[in-house]
Image (cartoon, rainbow, N blue to C red):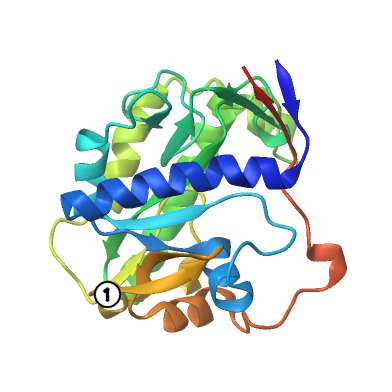
């Protein structure tokens, strides 16, 4: 395997994935939005945040489900998600470049190709008390799931890690419980990325923010994001136009290779 050590080479692989997903979504009427750090980069830098090394998009739940069923990345790209992949580490989908392999520090013992993250956006109850209950419960379920899948103890207590790890509940059952908890069938006025990698409760935002798409520049090309992207960014990140302190400008810890 040949190492990928240049961040620009890594980004070019990710941009290939993004381009393929963009073309597919445009031709099949599937909505997606640049999101998270990728969207901050698009707004603030017109491309990647200088120290960033991944790509994130959101999809409304209905579009996300269609994408999982219909996307065909051809020879180079494949969509992966927790329903179909055995021992899948994550709680959201990724599109990977199957010609590559990536190892990340936080996922010791688990690897996949260089990827782009795809997060479903779900309706969230407008009842704030109920919303807090759901967030507390989903946090617990995700913590149990992580303990069962991770090869290392990421908790402060070894006893707690062992209790969660050997709790007699299969990961597949946890996945179903999580999905029943976070997927609301009836529309509300509030939405959120409810996966493990989603924001805390303050990151919920109005459903009207994703009512339509707008074009946005990223790395010299045009992609799609949500019409209310500035409101989403402010609610999730606060003053997103101000650069963070230098000690917070960190990349993900990974090793990447061409197969």
**Image quadrant where residue 102 sits:** top right
At which x and y percent is residue 137? 42, 51
Q: Residue furthest front?
A: 220
Q: In the rendered image of this protein, does residue 3 appear above or below residue 70?
A: above
User: Which residue matches tag 1?
Assistant: 207
- Which quarter of the image is occupied by the C terminus? top right
**Image quadrant where residue 191 sits:** bottom left
At which x and y percent is residue 141? 45, 41
Q: In the rendered image of this protein, does residue 230 appear above or below residue 26?
A: below
Residue 177 appearing in the image: yes
At which x and y percent is residue 26? 24, 55
Q: In the rendered image of this protein, does residue 31 appear above or below residue 164?
A: below
Q: At numbered mark 1, what does the secondary structure look like: helix, strand or loop?
A: helix
Q: Residue at x 54, y 44 (%)?
A: 14
Q: How many marks?
A: 1
Q: Please name whichever residue, 17 or 130, is drawn nearer the observer in this view of the structure.
A: 17
Relative horizontal placement of residue 226, taking residue 257 as reference (left or right): left
Relative horizontal placement of residue 153, taking residue 150 as reference (left or right): right
Q: Residue furthest right?
A: 247
Q: Residue at x 44, y 38 (%)?
A: 94
Q: Residue at x 60, y 22 (%)?
A: 110
**Image quadrant where residue 100 sits:** top right
Residue 204 appearing in the image: no
Q: In the rendered image of this protein, does residue 48 appear above or below residue 169?
A: below
- Which quarter of the image is occupied by the N terminus? top right
Badge 1 density bin: few <14, some 14–19, many ≥20, Cα 10 Å: some
Q: Residue at x 14, y 56 (%)?
A: 185
At which x and y percent is residue 29? 17, 55
């Amino acid at each position: 395997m040949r190492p990928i050590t240049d961040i620009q080479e890594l980004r070019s692989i990710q941009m290939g994935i993004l381009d393929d997903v963009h073309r597919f979504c445009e031709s099949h009427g599937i909505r997606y939005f640049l999101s998270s750090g990728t969207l901050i980069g698009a707004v603030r830098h017109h491309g990647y945040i200088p120290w960033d090394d991944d790509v994130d998009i959101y999809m409304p739940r209905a579009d996300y489900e269609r994408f999982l069923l219909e996307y065909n990345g051809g020879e180079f790209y494949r969509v992966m998600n927790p329903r179909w992949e055995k021992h899948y580490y994550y709680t959201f989908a990724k599109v990977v470049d199957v010609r590559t392999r990536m190892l990340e520090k936080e996922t010791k013992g688990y690897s996949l190709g260089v990827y782009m993250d795809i997060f479903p956006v779900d309706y969230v109850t407008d009842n704030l008390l109920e919303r807090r209950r759901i967030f507390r419960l989903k946090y617990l379920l995700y913590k149990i799931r992580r303990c069962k899948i991770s090869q290392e103890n990421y908790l402060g207590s070894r006893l707690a890690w062992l209790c969660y790890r050997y709790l007699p509940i299969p990961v597949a059952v946890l996945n179903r419980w999580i999905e029943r908890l976070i997927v609301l069938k009836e529309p509300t006025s509030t939405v959120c990325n409810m996966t493990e990698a989603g924001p805390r409760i303050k990151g919920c935002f109005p459903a009207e923010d994703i009512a339509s798409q707008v074009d946005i520049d990223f790395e010299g090309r045009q992609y799609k994001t949500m019409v209310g992207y500035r409101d989403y960014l402010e609610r999730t990140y606060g003053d997103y136009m101000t650069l963070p302190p230098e000690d917070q400008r960190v990349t993900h810890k990974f090793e990447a290779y061409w197969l």
